[in-house]
Amino acid sequence: MAAEIENFRERLIRCLLRVLDERGELFQSILAKSQNCDPAFLMDVLHEMEARRLVCAARESSSTEYRLARRIEAPARTPPVPHKGVERRDSDHDCQDVLGSNYFQKLVRTVLRSLPEPSLVYSQWWFSEPTYSKLVHLLLGLQKKNPHVAFLGSSTLGAVFSQCVASPVTIIDVDDVLLERVGACAGRATQTIHRDISDPLDASLKAQFDVVVADPPWSSSNLRTFFVRSAEMLSLNGTLVISFPPVFTRPSAAADRKDLRRLGDLLGLSLTMRLTGFTEYDVPAFEYNAYKEHGIELKGPWRKGDIFVFRKQSKPTGNDEVPVEAIWKWDQYDYGTVRLFLKKNGSMQQGLARIIPVSGKNDFVYDSTSSRTQLWKQACLVSTRNHVADISGTKQLVTILRELRSKTADLSNTLECLSDISPDTRMALSVLLSKSDGKNSERAESR
């Protein structure tokens, strides 16, 4: 693992040597060109490059500008040979006039304003406003006559798209609160289905759709799960549009993409198009708060995804279904401006409710957006502001959370008046339900 990370670091340094020049760029600009590199990791690499005298840093009061220390010839790189049948397109291609109209902008903003606060539990990053027109334009260009289109983990896009077509649209999501909100904004021919996509599909969903649009969480297991389920839902000759993480998202990203391509062959999928850096995501409150702990203020969208388009040309090879990994189950409690998620662990523990920091800090802040860390695995209570905690006395805590849900208008006073709980638990709930100064907290895609 150490060797993999070191190799990843050196690849990133070579990339940055191509990105930077002697004029200098601010961190936010470098981040936007880093192919989805983790901001904290990117900052560490820039500090290392400064120590190695590869870059110079000009630090102002609120920002730092990086430039090449001297003219460095980056290693030549042979351009990759496109896969046969793959069309490469510029991600900034023009959209149809209607998609740039005031009507379409109002439609997108209406959907975005309706959304609950995004959560790391469901890996929710909402698309930025310009991305909706690009994606709708792409989907309209792929359409057959009156196609049946399904949206997995891309519910906000499904709601927008359903208002642009007369054909049936199905939106599937694990987040019931999100489904309720986008369902109210969707077109008349829209069906919403609440389900965990890691569960086996019902017969009513198998091979039923002409187009499936998936924006999965970018962990290795979730990518595989969404890829398999999407293929199962497609009819023969159907089209899959799915987002993949760019190669600098994590050390294993490039290998994960190759594995998924090989899995696509087994699922009867043939790659027809690849669009680099096509999707852009706003910064949700939980991500803003996570990187603020590292001294990094994310001032605007930086996270982008690659779009892969597949055609289902044949039935899957083999008779057995491709196994997928089950994911954690959560109960959620919506308090208007913040949501809490309680992990289902199969037990209702007795005793007084206790909320215990797993980060070692009483502010409960989780300083990452990764679901692969040990801290995340220990977390049983998670807020949309990126607070995490372990718990005990689950039965009493559930009673308290349900009581608070009906009193969101006067939440702070209600917390003060709660009886039969310890001062530490009352303090912890105050922190978990507090308002945030995070940016872009009104938006995020249920990925």
Image (cartoon, rainbow, N blue to C red):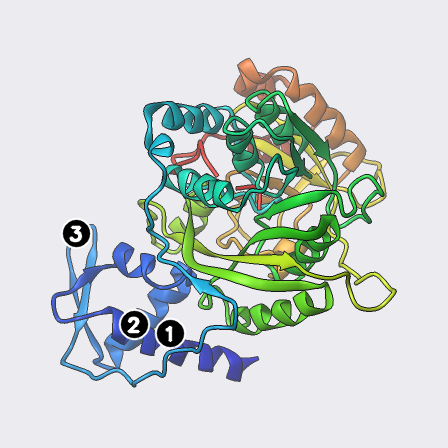
Q: Nearer the viewer, mark 2 or mark 3?
A: 2
- Splitting the image into 4 quarters, where does residue 107 fall? top left
Mark 1 lies on residue: 12
Q: Is residue 37 above or below residue 162?
A: below
Query: From this viewpoint, is residue 48 visible?
Result: yes
Q: Quadrant of the N terminus?
A: bottom right
Local secondary structure at mark 3: loop
Q: Is residue 294 above or below residue 342?
A: below
Residue located at (14% from left, 81% from top): 71
Mark 3 lies on residue: 61
Q: Nearer the viewer, mark 3 or mark 1?
A: 1
Disc with the residue nearer the chain's start (3 vs 1): 1
Left or right: where 131 falls relative to 365? left
Q: Position of residue 51 (x, y in %)?
A: 25, 78
Q: Position of residue 353 (x, y in %)?
A: 73, 35
> Do the residues bearing badges 3 and 1 touch, measured as CB atoms within 8 Å?
no
Q: CA distance from mark 3 to mark 1?
A: 27 Å
> Do the residues bearing badges 2 and 1 touch, measured as CB atoms within 8 Å?
yes
